[in-house]
Image (cartoon, rainbow, N blue to C red):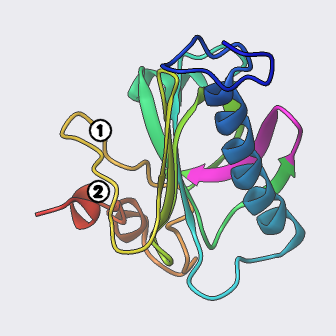
Amino acid sequence: MSKNGMGSGTSEDLIGYKALSEAALKGVMREALKFAAKSEALPGGHHFYVTFRTAAPGISMADAIKDRFPEEMTIVIQHQYWDLEVHNDSFEIVLKFGGVPQHLVIPYSAITRFFDPSVNYGLVFEMGTTALIEGGDQIEFGDDTPAIAEAAAEEDTSKSKEEAESTVVSLDAFRRK
């Protein structure tokens, strides 16, 4: 390889472009969460699906939730969320599960997917592979993705408990047919 870095063939990535790209895209997600933290509600139809590994280091949640979702879960940040605090390496949020408010701490390193279906924008962080999905393409989550946890879906507080608990979104709507 020449002094100017222009050589033939491929060489080892000593700069770490994959890690830099992932950090930059997690910054996009962090800024979107900061926008949600500043507002009482997200504008327009914006809402976020955040999928994360529940057994990852730094995760803090009630044992009952972790028992129900021992590997991975997806939360929805839309209408009803409280105390959203966005930090450099994690975020905290209070969401309702079965009508009971629960405090979650989620480090960005535990997040595997971030998706805003209102604008078909998504990020996938898995095993060192980062993908940006936007425009006409939809995220293919795969058949092993757990159901989205009922969290911020309790928009109308006058709903009965049965109606509120039945408000679970299926990812089938976002899969390619």
Q: Earlier in the sequence, mark 2 or mark 1?
A: 1
- Residue found 42% across the figure and 20% down from its top: 70
The picture quadrant where one finds residue 33 is bottom right
Q: Position of residue 173 (x, y in %)?
A: 24, 67
The picture quadrant where one finds residue 80 is bottom right
**Residue 144 located left or right of residue 55:** left
Q: How many marks?
A: 2
Disc 2 designates what residue?
171
- Callout 1 amino acid: Thr
The picture quadrant where one finds residue 3 is top right
Secondary element under disc 1, as helix, strand or loop, is loop
Q: Residues within 10 Å of mark 1 (few under 14, many from 20)?
A: few
Q: Main secondary structure of the magenta part?
A: strand
Taking 112 as reference, is 115 above or below it?
A: below
Disc 1 designates what residue?
145
Give the residues drawn in magenta, as a range.
86-96
Q: Position of residue 120 (x, y in %)?
A: 45, 71
**Tag 2 and tag 1, C-beta contact below 8 Å:** yes
Residue 61, visible in the rendered structure: no
